[in-house]
């Protein structure tokens, strides 16, 4: 058994990498977390063998895209950007960011544009910490997504879940 599954299910995102004026890629990622608020920062782990790693090393930026589409998440997570152009192959409609030239998936529940401020090599992965330079989320308030049950959670392998529609507030 794997220790990290004690922390699953976890929200899954699609990481966009590269520069929309040059070359781009998308990969699925559930190893992602907020880091700080004073400096709006988040971090994620990326295998050093991935094309996403190469593009982030080159351009020092990435995007985080929250989508409901499990099929798309699975496709970008199980194919290599070194072998195919995922945007063309999977008909991913994207646009360039407002603050950075990162690829943002159109129609996503949220898009975050991040500039790498630190990277930490840990075993087979690089943990990237990015400062969020711009972000936008649909149907969002002080508690987060109003329709939070649309945010997919990754359990492991092909197992995904969605949160319940029931929201509980503590007294």
Image (cartoon, rainbow, N blue to C red):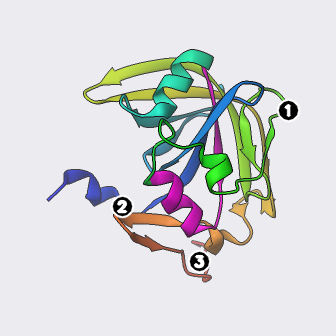
Is residue 109 depicted above or below 146 in this figure? above
Q: Indicate which disc, 3 or 1, sits on the residue closer to the N terminus.
A: 1
Mark 3 vs mark 1, foreground winner is 1
Query: Residue 161's spot in the image, x, y percent?
Result: 47, 74
Residue in the foreground of this view, choosing between 8 and 100: 100
Under circle 1, the secondary element is loop
Callout 2–callout 1 Cβ contact below 8 Å: no
Magenta stretch containing residue 98, yes or no? no
Can see residue 40?
A: no
Residue neighbourhood size for the residue with mark 2, other residues' Cα within 10 Å, grouped as few (<14), some (14–19), many (≥20): few
Under circle 2, the secondary element is loop
Residue picked out by circle 1: 98
Residue picked out by circle 2: 8
Q: Indicate which disc, 2 or 1, sits on the residue closer to the N terminus.
A: 2
Residue picked out by circle 3: 168
Callout 3–callout 2 Cβ contact below 8 Å: no
What residue sits 71% from the left and 72% below the top? 147
Left or right relative to 73: residue 6: left
- Image: magenta residue range: 60-77
């Amino acid at each position: 058994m794997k220790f990290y599954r004690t922390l699953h299910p976890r929200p899954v995102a699609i990481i966009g990498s590269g520069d929309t004026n040059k070359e781009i890629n998308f990969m699925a990622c559930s190893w992602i977390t907020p880091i700080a608020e004073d400096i709006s920062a988040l971090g994620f782990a990326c295998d050093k063998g991935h094309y996403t790693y190469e593009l982030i090393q080159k351009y020092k930026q990435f995007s985080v895209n929250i989508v409901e589409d499990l099929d798309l998440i699975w496709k970008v997570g199980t194919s290599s950007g070194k072998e195919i152009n995922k945007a063309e192959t999977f008909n991913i409609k994207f646009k360039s960011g407002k603050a950075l030239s990162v690829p943002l998936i159109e129609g996503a529940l949220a898009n975050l544009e991040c500039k790498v401020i630190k990277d930490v090599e840990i075993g087979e992965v690089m943990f990237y910490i990015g400062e969020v330079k711009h972000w936008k989320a649909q149907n969002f308030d002080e508690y987060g997504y109003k329709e939070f049950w649309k945010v997919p959670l990754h359990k492991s392998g092909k197992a995904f879940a969605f949160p319940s529609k029931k929201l509980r507030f503590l007294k």
